[in-house]
Image (cartoon, grey):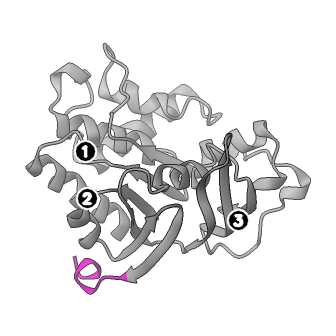
């Protein structure tokens, strides 16, 4: 497997924790719009948390910063031990591919190809040979309970099954961090609950997962809630009920 290519100045810290470390992060857009205002956030390895807030709160911008899809205007960002500010774009893309997995409300599956091929597509830039990509894809589908659906195409799957394929694709490369953006938003209640239970199972197996949501009920069911409003973190609480789930 190829290693992540990094810039010398982006030397990785030797201690594996935290997976996410934001210090005084701001993000401003043209016209003086401040999407994030001095955000401090630390996520340790193995955590399961909700980043919760209403529309326009800054949670999507925070997702983009943590997922290395965008850079902050100011402040420090370390993901999986790497200093993001010191990475050129190419190295940042390599880091994202190796260390961060994404699950979105829209499943983003390729129509006309099997679930197995869809999951294997997520490993295209891993440097792994095709046979190994397919092996890992099959393993990931089995992990999410779809070992008997590997040959099914997206139109042959239910909404909940499509989201499970998307989750399998996100975890096939064993990323340090899984970011789930409104993962139940396109699902009915039963399918949504099933997907959330799957995320809890993955977390119990050691995955670090952040669920970005506006749904207060989902947030309340997770061990930690980070509440964001007007670009600022206004609360960071631990839930006994969520921790016991």
Check the image and report above or below for 63 versus 236: above
As drawn, the label of residue 81 is: 3
Mark 2 residue crowding within 10 angstroms, few (<14) / some (14–19) / many (20+):
some
Q: Secondary structure at mark 2?
A: loop
Cα separation, mark 3 vs mark 2, equals 30 Å
Residue 2 visible in the displayed image: no
**Residue that appears at 54% across and 50% down:** 61
Horizontal side of residue 56 vs 222, given as left or right: right
Is 244 included in the stretch rendered in magenta?
Answer: yes
**Residue that appears at 49% across and 61% down:** 230
Q: Quadrant of the C terminus?
A: bottom left
Check the image and report above or below for 51 versus 85: below
Furthest residue in direction right, as rendered: 8
Q: Which residues are magenta?
A: 238-245
Q: Earlier in the sequence, mark 3 or mark 2?
A: 3
Horizontal side of residue 202 vs 231, given as left or right: left
**Residue that appears at 23% across and 52% down:** 195
Q: Earlier in the sequence, mark 1 or mark 2?
A: 1
- Pick whichever, 72 or 199, lies toward us: 72
Tags 3 and 2 touching, CB below 8 Å: no
Horizontal side of residue 156 vs 209, given as left or right: left
Is 61 included in the stretch rendered in magenta?
Answer: no
Q: Could you say where residue 12 lies in the image, as x and y percent from the top left?
A: 78, 63
As drawn, the label of residue 215 is: 2
Q: Quadrant of residue 226?
A: bottom left
Q: Quadrant of the N terminus?
A: top right
As drawn, the label of residue 185 is: 1
């Amino acid at each position: 497997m190829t290693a992540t290519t990094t810039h010398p100045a982006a030397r990785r810290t030797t201690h594996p924790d935290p997976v996410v470390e934001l210090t005084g992060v701001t993000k401003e857009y043209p016209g003086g719009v401040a999407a994030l205002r001095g955000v401090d956030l630390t996520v340790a390895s193995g955590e399961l948390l909700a980043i919760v807030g209403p529309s326009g709160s800054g949670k999507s911008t925070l997702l983009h910063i943590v997922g290395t899809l965008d850079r902050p205007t100011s402040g420090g960002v370390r993901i999986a031990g790497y200093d993001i500010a010191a990475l050129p774009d190419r190295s940042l893309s390599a880091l994202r591919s190796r260390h961060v997995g994404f699950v979105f409300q829209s499943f983003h599956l390729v129509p006309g190809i099997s679930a197995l091929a869809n999951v294997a597509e997520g490993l295209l830039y891993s440097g792994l040979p095709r046979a190994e990509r397919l092996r890992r894809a099959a393993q990931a589908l089995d992990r999410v309970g779809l070992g008997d659906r590997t040959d099914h195409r997206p139109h042959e799957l239910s909404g909940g099954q499509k989201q499970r394929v998307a989750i399998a694709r996100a975890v096939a490369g064993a990323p340090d961090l899984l970011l789930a953006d409104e993962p139940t938003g396109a699902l009915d209640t039963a399918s949504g609950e099933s997907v959330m239970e799957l995320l809890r199972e993955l977390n119990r197996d050691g995955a670090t997962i952040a669920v970005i949501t506006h749904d207060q009920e989902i947030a309340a069911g997770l061990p930690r809630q980070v509440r964001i409003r007007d670009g600022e973190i206004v609360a960071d609480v631990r839930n006994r009920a969520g921790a016991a789930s």
